[in-house]
Image (cartoon, rainbow, N blue to C red):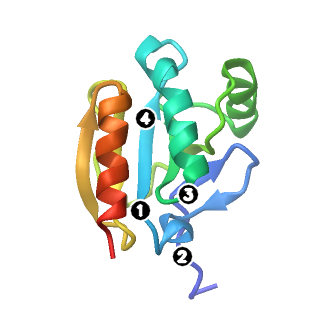
Amino acid sequence: GACTPAPEFIAATGQPVSLRHFAGKPLLVNYFAPWCAPCLREMPLLAALHREGRIGVIAINYDPASPGELAELARRHQIAVPLMVPLDEASLPFPRPGALPTSYLLDGEGRLQETLVGEIDEHRLADLRAWAAAQP
């Protein structure tokens, strides 16, 4: 319908998803690839952040993939954050990254706050947690 937000992603479940589904709390959008060792190393930290619930986390496979392929990737690599496929026509508040891993931190209104290029480690995770704790 006219009031339904346009989807920007297709989830591994096959369902269309909009960034507006995540409105109200910060969201970390992580680009990864299964051939990227730092991407896979940071996944347990991203899963921990996601479980804590102060910042939502979604992961986007850098290479084209079907929802079924994403589900298989999640199973094979034990990825515990929602996997998404961006739609070509999506109007996202960030560009497709030129390096992996890259994460985009959005505030609760969907505005880009920070671009994190490179692997998220414990130090960066602590910075994200501190940022989230300072949000109103």
Kind of residue sitting beneath label 2: Pro
> SS class of the residue under badge 3?
loop
Name the residue that disc number 1 marks.
26
Q: Can you say whether 83 is above or below 78 in the image?
A: below
Q: Would you say the residues marked 3 and 4 are in contact, meaning their CB atoms lie under 8 Å apart? A: no
Which of the 4 image quadrants contains residue 120? top left
Three-letter code, disc 3: Gly
Frontmost of labels 4 and 2 is 4
- Does 59 sit above or below residue 16? above
Q: Report whether 66 appears left or right of 26.
A: right
> Where does residue 72 sit, x and y in percent of width and height?
75, 26
Residue kind at label 1, given as amino acid type: Pro
Say whether disc 4 or disc 2 marks the residue closer to the N-terminus: 2
**Gap in Å between the C-alphas at discs 1 and 2?**
18 Å
Mark in front: 3 vs 4:
3
Look at mark 4 in the image and give the residue it sits on: 31
Taking the image as shown, residue 54 lies to the left or right of residue 125, namely: right
Label 3, label 4: how far apart the Cα atoms are: 20 Å
Q: Quadrant of residue 136?
A: bottom left
Amino acid, disc 4: Tyr
Residue drawn at x 37%, y 38% is 125
Residue at 74% of width from left, 49% of height from top?
A: 14
Label 4: element kind: strand
* Pick the front one: 121 or 110: 121
From the viewer's perspective, is residue 45 above or below residue 8?
above
Mark 2 and mark 3 residues within 8 Å of each other at the beta carbon: no
Q: Which residue is mark 3?
A: 53
Query: How many neighbours does mark 1 have within 10 angstroms: few (below 14), some (14-19), or many (20 or more)?
Result: many
Kindly identify which residue carries mark 2. Answer: 5
User: From mark 1 to mark 4, how far is it between C-alphas?
Assistant: 16 Å
